[in-house]
Amino acid sequence: MFNSNHLKANHEATKIRFFEETLINGLHIIFHQDNTNPLVSISVLYHVGTKNEFPGKSGFAHFFEHLMFEGSKNIKKGDFFKYIASNGGKNNAYTNHDETCYYEILPSDRLPLALWLESERMLHAKIDEESINIQREVVKEEKKMQIENQPYAKAISEIIPSLLFKKHPYKYPIIGFEKDLNTATKKDYKKFYETYYVPNNATLVVTGDFEMNEARNLVHRYFSSIPKGKIDFNMKKIEEEPIKKEIFFTYVDKNTKVPGVFLSYRLPKMTDEDTYVLKIIDHVLSSGESSRIMKNVINKKQLASYAGSFLDSMEDYGIFIIYGLINPKITLDQLTKVIDEEIENLKKKGITQYELNKQKNFFEKKFLFDNYSMSGIASNLSHYFLYYKNTNLINTDIEKYRKISVEDIKIVANKYLNKNCRVRLYNVPIS
């Protein structure tokens, strides 16, 4: 039986302490000092992703994730990686629908190097024809490998979002469309850089082994003179009309040999209280051998060779996909019917207290585990500041899960997991 007392005591002992400040140019900085290991982790999160793109200009945020390693006014092409590797560190970046993040982990005496590199990226990035052309080909190749030649990838990243969202830029794939990549100009990219790669649209996090006054002085030295961006970033949310009738779509996938069904639901934004409940529902349905879909659809009824669900919670909306790939001699309609029975069963009967306790236990452990590494702490600090405007949720967010009741599961499942407000996509091979 679940007992959170030990975990609560453990959590108190591992409370994350941090200091935050905002420079006059709007750059928000969060410091978390931990002198256990002689390492520092530095991340700069820019509040720009697919959400900030327009028709004909898709894939810009992801393209910049590549372009920002090309060099700057004071860093030669390709030297970003060389600086990090030759100083015993590692670095990388990622893009999603709402953000682009760059990060480094280095020996602690190399903190000035990391801050200099990130200040160069923010102020002096090299956006020239040669760099653009190189990265355009790199991104096209990435698109071929990850989307064009992978089964189910196009359905999940392009088709389903375009059916769930009619107006919101979440309908675009993160990697963008090839035609937009081909037509984007240097002027377009420079405008994007000057708009979004500015201090008042960024959060800098420094975690690890440093001396506070020294780290603050270094940050001020490298970043305080960078000019503030010119636009107001309080974007108005683009509201979607509710889906009132199931949208059915068949996608013929040249890479697929096994047909699959994907049931997709539009959810509320990540900060909505219901999102916490939906994360538990996602786990009850498909996480582990004892989950509903694994136990009943795959093992007991043997209608699917593979099935599950995944929840992508974003700043303005979320997407929840429940999917299954059929076994031989089973039709997609048969598999859909059985998955729907599992969803309806969840809505009518809910879950047991034992199931709920098991999930709370999982999220409690995950919460603690995510705060064990410097990179995990850095990611959580910037995440809670950016989206919730409350950095201290890094210590208290687990309370939201602790308060969830069995009744909440039923209420939220009935609110969102309805046939008339979803997309049902059949992903089929070429016949």
Image (cartoon, grey):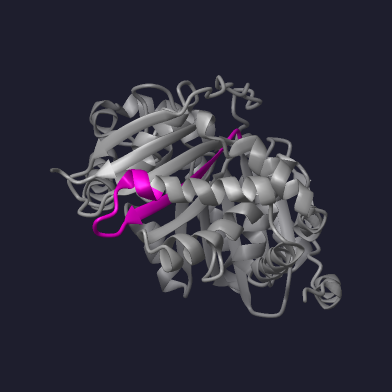
Q: Quadrant of residue 397?
A: bottom right
Vertical position of residue 389 compared to residue 206: above or below: above
The answer to whether residue 122 is seen in the rendering is yes
> Would you say residue 317 sits in the magenta stretch?
yes
Vertical position of residue 163 compared to residue 264: above or below: above
Toward the left, the furthest residue is: 431
Q: Residue at x 28, y 38 (%)?
A: 132
Q: Residue at x 80, y 60 (%)?
A: 395
Q: Quadrant of the C terminus?
A: top left
> Would you say residue 377 sits in the magenta stretch?
no
For the residue pair 379 and 335, the one nearer the viewer reads as 335
Vertical position of residue 1 compared to residue 187: above or below: below
Q: Image check: 148 left or right of 81?
A: left
Q: How many marks?
A: 0
For the residue pair 16 and 269, the one nearer the viewer reads as 269
Q: From the top left corner, tell me how far across and down residue 193 is, in percent.
A: 46, 33
Q: From the top left corner, tell me how far across and down residue 68 is, in percent.
A: 41, 46
Q: Quadrant of the N terminus?
A: bottom right
* Residues drawn in magenta: 316-335
Q: From the top left corner, tell me how far across and down residue 258 is, in percent.
A: 24, 54
Q: From the top left corner, tell me how far across and down residue 214 is, in percent.
A: 73, 63
The answer to whether residue 72 is seen in the rendering is no
Q: Residue at x 65, y 66 (%)?
A: 370
Q: Residue at x 52, y 62 (%)?
A: 104
Vertical position of residue 311 compared to residue 47: above or below: below
Q: Quadrant of residue 239?
A: top right
Q: Quadrant of residue 315?
A: top right
